[in-house]
Amino acid sequence: MVMDFVGNLLALVLEAAPWVVLGLLVAGLIKAWLPMAGLAARLKGRGLTAVGGAALLGAPLPLCSCGVLPAAFGLRRAGASKGATTSFLISTPETGVDSVLLSYVLLGPVFAVVRPVVAVASAIATGLAVAVAVRDEAATPPAPPPAAGCCGGETAEERTGLVAGLRYAFADLWDDIALWLAGGVLAAAVVVTVAPPDVLAAWAQGPLAMLVVLAVSVPMYVCASASTPLALALLHAGVSPGTALVFLLAGPATNLAGLALVRRELGGATMAIYLAGVVATSLAAGLALDAIWSVAAWPLPAAPTGQAESGYHLWLGLASALVLLLAYRPIRRRILPAPATPAPAHDHA
């Protein structure tokens, strides 16, 4: 059993590490080249253009459900409407370049396509509901800081340039998601090792299973990347693909700390529509995916086998895992010299 767990864990790490590195590289390029400061003016309206633009803007960004708050509230204070801000708040944590790449390698092409499409559709539908139902007064309060326990590296001072973007991705962003992703991989390896493939099949189908997953995932904090190996574990524990999709959507988009800050910044009515929109669209997408999956008879994504496909894949996985390990803050600080502190100037009177 122990050796099976070690093999499954190693297979997951070697399989996921190159894609995490690629996702961080893309995240750094987005950070370096995307003019966030000038986008708020395009998001002032209450119609489909502003709300849809906010959803498409947020979809590729690799920000978690707490890290997205400062960015979203910054757009709000710069003039973005409540509907557009809500749309950005939903699409950004539900998907991203890093989580889409992980979805493809761990869950297969169906999840890699469905996940971002549903995230954008959910964001647009909920944002339009806010635009119609909530009065959009000018934003005056300052943006609240991320709550304790949330990732906070995205709140670092604004930097520009390619090198600064890569530093953000492999330092700030990676420091924020590393422990969550490691926990998700460990949990996935445990479940894949000890759970029979159909242990939950008796109850893990249909709306009841999705409601159970919602009850667990809505209050908890899990980022989009970390939720991906957990979804793989759920699939191999017997839950339906639609139920796994509900977890992938609702988990990253909601948590109690984030909901409290949304209420403070955008109001109680917006928060209620935000939560209802995430829940309703997640359930609808999960039921639709289960129905399509049963008709198409697609195979479930394969569980990790613990065997590398080739020497090339083995060395690529090991090299990528080493890069991620050395980039993590506690290890990085031991390797890289501390920045020199300028000596205080002395007044030679």
Image: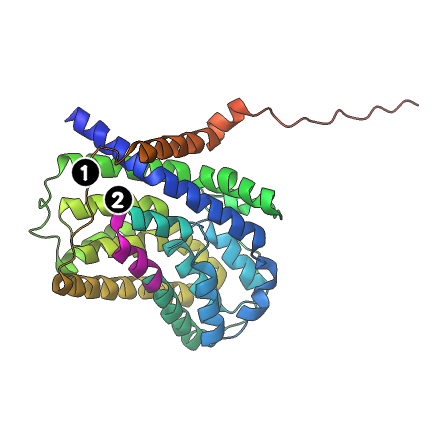
Percent across and percent down for residue 212 are 19, 53
**109 within the magenta span:** yes
Report which quarter residue 297 is drawn in. bottom left
- Outermost residue, front direction? 311
Q: Which residue is mark 2?
A: 230
Residue drawn at the location 41% of the way across and 73% of the way down: 128
Question: Magenta stretch: residue 9 in it?
Answer: no
Label 2 vs label 1: CA separation? 9 Å
Q: Is residue 172 left or right of residue 94?
A: right
Asked if residue 254 shows in the view, the reply is no
Relative to 161, does residue 89 appear above or below in the rendering?
below
> Which residue carries the number 1 mark?
191
Quadrant in which the C terminus is drawn: top right
* Amino acid under disc 1: Val
Question: Residue 3's x, y, as percent?
Answer: 18, 25
Q: Nearer the viewer, residue 125 or 268?
A: 125
Magenta stretch secondary structure, dominant: helix
Q: Residue 268 is drawn in which quadrant?
A: bottom left
What is the three-letter code of the residue carrying label 2? Leu
How busy is the neighbourhood of tag 1: few (under 14 within 10 Å), some, or many (20 plus)?
Answer: many
Q: Quadrant of the N terminus?
A: top left
- The x, y position of residue 145, in whole percent, is 52, 48
Earlier residue among tags 2 and 1: 1
Q: Is residue 102 visible?
A: yes
Residue 120 circle label: none
Q: Position of residue 89 (x, y in %)?
A: 43, 59
In the image, the segment drawn in magenta is 106-117
